[in-house]
Amino acid sequence: MYYLPELVIVAAGFFVLISDLFMPKHHRKYLPPLSLGAAAIAIGLLLANVNVAAEYLGGRFVISPLTTWFKIIFLLGGAFTVLLTWNSKRFERITAPGEFFSILLFTQVGMMCLISSTDLASLYISLELSTIPLFALAAWKRGDKYSGEAGIKYVLYGALASALLLYGFGLLYASSGSLDLRVVGDTFTATPLAWIALALVISGVGFKLTLTPFHFWAADVYQGAPTPVTAYLSVASKAAGLAFMFQIFFGMFGAQLAEWQWLIAALATASMTVGNLIAIIQRNIKRFMAFSSISQAGYLIMGFIGPYPEGAPAMLFYMLIFAFTNMAVFGVIMWYDDETGRTDINDYHGLSKTNPVLALVMLLALFSLAGVPPMAGFVGKFFLFSIAAKAGMHWLVAVAAINSTISLFYYLRIVRAMYIETPTEGQRRLPVSPVMQTTLAVTTAGVIFLGVIPLFYNLIERHLTDWLRWFAGW
Amino acid sequence: MSLVPGLEHWFILSTLFFAIGLYGVLSRRSAVGVLIGVELMLNSTALNFVIFNRYLATPFLDGAVMMIFVIAVAAAEAVLAMAIFVQIFRSRHSVDISTMTEMRY
């Protein structure tokens, strides 16, 4: 019963949806702790069986250390998102909490099945289960023109990306006669048909992971969507994109990956450079974080180069760090949005005078995103850059290092707004709810300790290396 | 010369649908028109799976099963998209996507 975590989340999703119908209004405050409890139970079950490999449904649902670590990251992203919405004043007024949390839980199930599936049919269904509900979440603020615009852009881009992806899947099916990922990969021959199929599939992956030529939806959707949804998109949905890319590149084309180094390097270079350069001129902090996360996706996929056995754990470790770091940043953004309703970078002027602790949390998290040494982000980036160096792509390491420097410049713009600029007239100390304090404490602890304590990376690396040796024969 | 359509004919038909759908996506200004284009593309992929199943992977039914899933997912996507359009129409009285430029840097 190693698929119990999925069942727990499905059951919790339906329970939240149905109990919301019959619940008196004042009991709705129990929905966030309930969703959080389900996520915590699922994480506990996963951690208890972290080193297990199993197969269900005739090999169509696979459980391995890799899938388990991915599921832990998805559930952490979901749990933090629930924590952000809990006790939120602004958010409670605009939403139907029952539907919100059940949709959130259903997307979690989609992501968990995405990494566990082994054939194109279940891969596609679980990808759509983790994407389609997010369209609704992006448009959640009813009557808000920004949220509506975010929803319409996301749904149209998403439907187009899914059509392109499916056409690619169709061509792969034509060239192999099977929907099984391994069979498709093993029978892959370099025909024009296969290249078209690959291009279409990569455009679908790029949409989900916000890689550069496919990133255009991200800025508007991140800016317009409600802040907790933006946080969820930037952490859990991006992790799902990475999981999907793992499925395509390691699960399907593991044997061909060595010849595609240049493709990955080009995508990584484009994402880093475009994301970083456009982030410099942003004024809205959520839009700014969209471009920041595009550039982070660029760093992230450097782990596919090679492929080396160190690549998978390095990417997974960076994703874990990214989940904590980005959630710390979005915790502060959410809190400020909730208290004042403002999301411009200029609104953060003088935050260090009025709320020094939250300014410090933001500072640490931004330094981690930029990759300043004692923070976790530096350690994560170090492992990723070392993979590019190992493959002999020193120019890519140089590009990534220059991009990190550029990113430090724009992350410091926010630090400057908080620490150097004077507060605007009449700005006073804003209250922080206990739930938000806990969230920020946990995420900040992650930002500081994930990199310094070697336990986490060692754990991921040991589990994954054993599994990769068995899986790919490296 | 046989008059029975073969793999090539069906594939050309589905590619044509895909291309017409893509043209619709790129040229329509109404969100509903774009959605119709996307649906045409999704249906051409569903057709693809059936064709490839019939001609290239005969004894199995993988492609036919995939086709059913594709249709179901496309329906879910269309419903959600229409719901979002209705919501936008209420506040803006139009679903013209070329006017949706509220968000700038």
Image (cartoon, coloured by chain):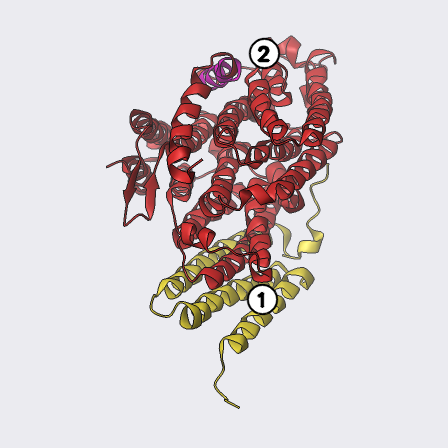
Q: Does residue A304 appear in this view?
A: yes
Which range of residues does the magenta coloring cover?
A: A437-450
Q: Position of residue A364 (x, y in %)?
A: 59, 15
Chain appearing in yellow on the rendered image: B
Give percent across and percent down for residue B103: 69, 41
Q: Chain of mark 1?
A: B
Q: Which mark is residue A199?
A: none
x 40%, y 33%: residue: A469
Badge nearest the viewer, 2 or 1? 2
Q: Position of residue B100 (x, y in %)?
A: 68, 50
**Image quadrant where one finds the N terminus of chain A:** top left
Three-letter code, disc 1: Phe
Q: Colour of chain A?
A: red
Tell me: residue A189, above or below residue A101.
below
The residue indicated by pointer 2 is: A374
Viewer-side residue, A11 vs A346 = A11
